[in-house]
Amino acid sequence: MRPLLAVAALAALTGCFTAYESRAADDGIGAPTQCEVAADCVLAGPSCCDCPSYATPASSGWLETCANVDCTPPTDGSCAPLTAECHAGTCVAVCAPTACDTACPAGYAADASGCLTCMCAPTSAPAACLLDTDCVQVPADCCGCARGGTDTAVPAAEADSHVMGLGCPANPGEVPCPEVTTCAADVGPRCILGQCVLGDSSLGPPPLPPGACGRADLPECPAGHACVINQDPAGNPLGVGVCTPVP
């Protein structure tokens, strides 16, 4: 078991959470266990002032550190709608399910992290790709899925400018990432409706999830149901939600 490093004082002075060690329990085969339930995890980001982009154990001290920093992440809707969950003993950030009131002609728009928003996708966006091979997978934040963050897909010709636009430090070690991969083996860059997205890397167009909604060519949800985005990951590349019973 590795100890929790006392870095709160340093982080409070800088406004950034510069390092952490989580309390890890040995599961008997040498792999650390970060969590047992979602409540064991919290969202974190490059600093206390930036949008959250990954999940870290609650025991890392992130919340306690940021409580002493005089800033908060933006609240204008520019942050990705993420929530912290525990998957197989690892804290991961996933798109938060959100109910949307209206349907869109071309489905809902996705943000840089691949999470759907209730904003409508543009219906006249110029085609960025023709084939899956026109797209590449790139980090959506300074951690990327290889280090516990998230990835996205962009046209191959825009990969370098996208990475530069993230504004990440030249030294990757300056970014406090969970250092646990969240990459999915069956997800890769796809060209869907002329746009680069991350989706099922198998051949053929991805099928609509059961109860798909939110697009003009799909039926409205029945009474007592709402169209919820980010509920079924299969709907994200297609810009659709799924009809979900309202409590």
Image: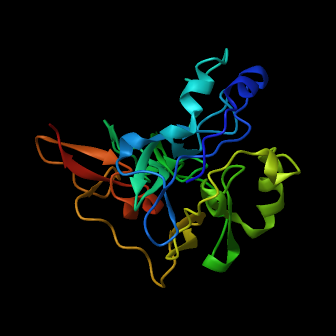
Residue placed most toward the observer, 235 or 24: 24
Residue at the far bottom: name it. 203
Tally the numbered discs: 0
Kindly identify the residue that appears in the image at 76 percent across and 26 percent down: 10
Residue at the far top: name it. 70
Q: From what the image shows, is residue 74 above or below residue 222?
A: above
Residue at the far right: name it. 170
Q: Is residue 148 visible?
A: yes
Q: Position of residue 219 (x, y in %)?
A: 22, 55
Image quarter of the N terminus: bottom right
Kindly identify the residue that appears in the image at 72 percent across and 49 percent down: 142
Q: Is residue 43 left or right of residue 40?
A: right
Q: Is residue 225 left or right of residue 166?
A: left
Q: Is residue 226 left or right of residue 88?
A: left
Residue placed most toward the observer, 24 or 70: 24
Q: Position of residue 163 (x, y in %)?
A: 79, 55
Q: Is residue 74 visible?
A: no
Residue at the far left: name it. 223
Kindly identify the residue that appears in the image at 42 percent across and 58 percent down: 89
Colour mode of the rendering: rainbow
Q: From what the image shows, is residue 125 above or below residue 203?
A: above
Q: Position of residue 152 (x, y in %)?
A: 62, 59
Kindly identify the residue that appears in the image at 70 percent across and 45 percent down: 176
Residue placed most toward the observer, 129 or 16: 16
Image quarter of the C terminus: top left
Q: Position of residue 90 (x, y in %)?
A: 47, 57
Q: From what the image shows, is residue 245 above or below residue 208?
A: above
